[in-house]
Amino acid sequence: MDLRGLRYFVAVAEERHIGRAAARLRMTQPPLSRAMHHLEADLGVALFARTPTGVELTEAGQLLYTDARPLLQQAERMAARVRATAGRATLTVGSLADTAELVGGRIASAFRERHPTVSVRIHEADLGDPSAGLRAGLVDVALTRLPFEDNGLRSHALHAEPIGIVVRADDPLAGKPAVRLADLRERRWVQLPPDTDQMWRAYWTGAPADSGTPMRTIQECLQAVLWNGMSALAPLDQVIPAGLVTVPVLDRPPSTLVLAWPALRPAPLVRSFVRIAAEVYRGTDRRRD
């Protein structure tokens, strides 16, 4: 058991419904269901009885709920005391795949200048979580790319980048000035995890899902192109290994780099981070112009 799993459990226990608990936790239902199955497997007991309208606590589940609530409250008090003693605030920034370099390269120095005592932690998510940890409550603010289901979130667009198809340098498409995805349905495409946000999967996958092995990182995708001759979609400014080529795609809108954060009562430090990042990117765009 860990504290995050217990927080998930308490939410389900109080809501008596996986879907409502997932909405409360700002995450999707499948990973919450999996977390509850894993918790039951770890303990070796059934914590919930499934009903037509949701779930009910078993006797073992009621005991865990009774003990978990004060434990979580004590953990929160302990964390608050530690932060107060240290005298430093902490901001956790979610980063999705290729956005990690953008966090460090453009925003970090400006943020440090205004908040020299704030400790920043970077949480790098894989391609299966376009919210970069926001849905799971792991981060305060996320630097990611649209489109994905953003109910309960707010976002600010920083930059739009055309996308292309990544192929091997010896691929027949490599010499073309541009292509259309509508003409490339028969190619073998890298696939994203099956539980990935559907809007995200539809945008970054060149064809409907097949039985191929899902990829969770950009490097896995690029290596599948390099070694197995598959195709992948990526921003045109994506750094790719030698032996690969990115060909512009004409019939897919640009990829939008965004800052995302919870819509409900964002912390002052989150609002400051968003303002600083927006200023940095405005200044970068003006220099490009």
Image (cartoon, rainbow, N blue to C red):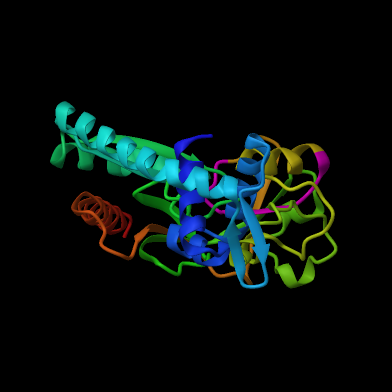
Total tally of numbered discs in the picture: 0
In terms of depth relative to the viewer, which is nearer, 81 or 243?
A: 81
**Residue 112: in sight, yes or no?**
yes
Q: Residue furthest front?
A: 59
Q: Is residue 196 above or below residue 240?
A: below
Q: Position of residue 108 (x, y in %)?
A: 28, 39
In terms of depth relative to the viewer, which is nearer, 155 or 278?
A: 155
Q: Quadrant of residue 271?
A: bottom left
Give left or right: position of 67 versus 130: left
In terms of depth relative to the viewer, which is nearer, 89 or 69?
A: 69
Q: Position of residue 133 (x, y in %)?
A: 46, 48
**Residue 127: in sight, yes or no?**
no
Asked whether residue 233 is drawn in magenta, I would say: yes
In terms of depth relative to the viewer, which is nearer, 175 or 135?
A: 135
Give left or right: position of 115 versus 28: left
Q: Residue at x 40, y 67 (%)?
A: 152
Q: Residue at x 18, y 32 (%)?
A: 88
Q: Residue at x 27, y 55 (%)?
A: 274
Q: Quadrant of residue 253?
A: bottom right
Q: Residue furthest top?
A: 86
Give left or right: position of 227 versus 286: right
Give left or right: position of 77 versus 216: left
Q: Position of residue 222 (x, y in %)?
A: 68, 42
Asked whether residue 232 is drawn in magenta, I would say: yes
**Looking at the rendering, in which quadrant would you find the N terminus?**
top right
| Magenta span | 228-239
Q: Quadrant of residue 259?
A: bottom left
Q: Is residue 189 above or below residue 228?
A: below
Q: Residue at x 77, y 55 (%)?
A: 189
Q: Position of residue 91 (x, y in %)?
A: 28, 41
**Looking at the rendering, in which quadrant would you find the C terminus?**
bottom left
